[in-house]
Image (tube, rainbow, N blue to C red):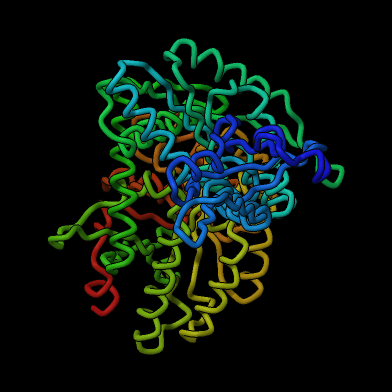
């Protein structure tokens, strides 16, 4: 519109100025200015819409024009283009509330939405559902193809999530490969149907990277948000616990949280142990015990000890490993514990005057540590740092850990054996394919699963199994060790079968290292 065309026209016919929040026209600021005799400005966001439909964010102010006598003779309208500033503010606001990788709500924004839903449930008695979603195979993609591939998987899965929830619902990335879905005005049965379709979609999804194809799944924990729900923290904790129960039941499934659920209570107990373990690591509240392993066939054979870990509670009381290690295994704390054992054991061995090569000290390693790409370097660094003779160190690896991480275990054993360390295959016989796998890894010792040892006197099948394992081990130039030897009768039977070593309460209970190694 030209100046001549605009002259004499109402402002609303000349400028299309609307509120950004609702697109409603702004009340004529010039008329308000003339009627009230004061400056008119707006705190809210105002948009100027041009004839070609382009929009500009503007700072709009109308001020009266006064003559010599103070009377109002007109008004001046000032529009300041703040589009660039407004765009920047919107961008900053978006970045503050959204995850940079996936574009989903970040944890802070998601928790705020959850807080609003909780307040609504308290006021209106509406029911919503919170879903905690965890990818089942994300670590495999990350470890196999690297973090760039992992990031791309998260982006693609996020888009998949968007297409399988309603517009009224909220999706957030809570951290790593964990997501939250807030289903608005959705009872638990309806939510289960939505999540089941989401699970099916992810199961059918195939992720491809560098000609490698991956199938993934999701474990989902659901918790209703009702007028009885107490806090956002409690809701997230319950949904997280339900998700982990879904994982424990076999992954790629849903699990609905119910108050008083035994499985969820067990998970909460495990999470408490996670906190206690982390705190004990920070405060160095662990100690080393060891148990003697005696030779049965050759009294002049090397002395052997197995190092064992104990945790101390806040009052200094001993906590046995069967109490805290299951939680450590489940929540990937074993690498930190294994590092603590190696660091402290090597420091201890360094202080033993000239430990002879005729003594062997056993250290248990978890499968999680074997799968840790930095763990081998850590072990070598600690050997060098404490000037430990590698020939006196024997690493004990369970059959399950060894064969579930076959490639990394093989590399780990090969490199440390080259330095002089020895290796013992622990709990042998517990797996279905034990004998088939045995020749694939270069172990020095074969530790027979204690389940076969306990009843070797009364059970002919256990006796035959121990005899067979011992025979095969010796054919492969491995020394055999029987664990859980608790009677003299069992000790005698093992000796007659030709087993090389034994350990157990019939020989000696685990003792603090200071008492055993310095005696």
- Is 227 or 423 nearer to us in this picture? 227
- Is 217 or 467 nearer to us in this picture? 217
Among all residues in the image, which is located at the extreme front?
69
Q: Is residue 66 left or right of residue 241?
A: right
- Which quadrant would the C terminus be assigned to in this image? bottom left
Measured along the vertical axis of the image, is residue 176 above or below residue 11? below
Q: Identify the residue at image location x=42%, y=14%.
A: 188
Give the total number of marks visible in the rendering: 0
- Is 281 or 445 nearer to us in this picture? 281
Measured along the vertical axis of the image, is residue 514 above or below residue 438? below
Q: Quadrant of residue 47?
A: top right
Q: Identify the residue at image location x=28%, y=26%.
A: 229
Among all residues in the image, which is located at the extreme top?
189
Q: Identify the residue at image location x=44%, y=17%.
A: 185
Q: Identify the residue at image location x=56%, y=71%.
A: 421
Measured along the vertical axis of the image, is residue 329 above or below residue 266? below
Q: Position of residue 180 (x, y in %)?
A: 50, 34
Measured along the vertical axis of the image, is residue 336 above or below residue 271? below
Q: Position of residue 513 (x, y in %)?
A: 28, 71
- Which quadrant would the N terminus be assigned to in this image? top right
Residue 499 visible in the picture: no
Among all residues in the image, which is located at the extreme right?
211
- Is 423 or 121 nearer to us in this picture? 121
Q: Position of residue 350 (x, y in %)?
A: 40, 84
Among all residues in the image, which is located at the extreme left?
315
Residue 496 visible in the picture: yes
Q: Position of residue 124 (x, y in %)?
A: 31, 17
Q: Is residue 53 left or right of residue 443?
A: right
């Amino acid at each position: 519109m030209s100046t001549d065309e605009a002259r004499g026209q109402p402002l609303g016919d000349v400028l299309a100025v609307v509120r950004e929040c609702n697109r409603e026209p702004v009340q004529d600021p010039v008329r308000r200015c003339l009627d009230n005799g004061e400056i008119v400005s707006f705190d809210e966001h105002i948009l100027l819409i041009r004839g070609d439909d382009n929009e500009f964010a503007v700072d709009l102010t109308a001020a009266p024009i006064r003559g010599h006598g103070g009377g109002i003779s007109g008004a001046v309208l000032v529009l300041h283009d703040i589009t660039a500033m407004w765009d920047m503010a919107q961008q900053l606001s978006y970045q503050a509330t959204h995850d940079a990788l996936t574009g989903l709500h970040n944890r802070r924004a998601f928790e705020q939405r959850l807080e609003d839903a909780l307040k609504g449930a308290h006021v209106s008695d509406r029911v919503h559902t919170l879903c905690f979603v965890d990818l089942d195979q994300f670590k495999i993609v990350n470890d196999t193809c690297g973090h760039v591939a992992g990031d791309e998987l998260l982006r693609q899965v996020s888009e998949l999530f968007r297409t399988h929830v309603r517009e009224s619902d909220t999706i957030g990335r809570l951290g790593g490969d964990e997501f939250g879905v807030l289903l608005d005005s959705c009872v638990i049965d309806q939510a289960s149907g939505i999540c089941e379709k989401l699970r099916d979609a992810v199961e059918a999804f195939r992720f491809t990277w560098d000609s490698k194809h991956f199938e993934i799944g999701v474990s989902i924990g659901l918790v209703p948000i009702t007028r009885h729900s107490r806090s956002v923290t409690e809701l997230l904790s319950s949904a997280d616990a339900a998700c982990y129960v879904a994982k424990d039941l076999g992954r790629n499934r849903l699990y609905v949280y119910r108050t008083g659920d035994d499985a969820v209570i067990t998970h909460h107990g495990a999470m408490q142990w996670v906190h206690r373990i982390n705190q004990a690591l920070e405060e160095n509240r662990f100690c080393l015990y060891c148990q003697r392993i005696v030779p049965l066939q050759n009294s002049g054979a090397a002395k052997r000890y197995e190092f064992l870990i104990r945790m101390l509670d806040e009052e200094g009381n001993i906590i046995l490993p069967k109490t805290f290690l299951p939680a450590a295994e489940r929540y990937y704390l074993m690498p930190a514990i294994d590092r603590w054992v190696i660091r402290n054991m090597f420091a201890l061995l360094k202080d033993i005057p000239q430990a002879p090569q005729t003594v062997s000290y056993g250290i248990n390693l978890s499968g999680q540590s074997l799968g840790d790409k930095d763990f081998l370097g850590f072990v070598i660094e600690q050997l060098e740092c404490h000037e430990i003779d590698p020939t006196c160190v024997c690493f004990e690896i369970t059959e399950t850990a060894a064969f579930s991480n076959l490639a990394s275990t093989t590399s780990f054993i090969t490199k440390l054996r080259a330095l002089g360390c020895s290796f013992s295959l622990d709990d042998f016989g517990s797996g279905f394919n034990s004998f088939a796998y045995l020749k694939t890894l270069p172990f020095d010792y074969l530790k027979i699963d204690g389940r076969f040892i306990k009843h070797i006197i009364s059970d002919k099948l256990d006796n035959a199994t121990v005899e067979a394992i011992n025979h095969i081990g010796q054919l492969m130039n491995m020394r055999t060790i029987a664990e859980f030897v608790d009677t003299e009768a069992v000790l005698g039977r093992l000796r007659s079968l030709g087993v090389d070593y034994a350990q157990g309460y019939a020989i000696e209970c685990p003792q603090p290292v200071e008492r055993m190694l310095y005696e």
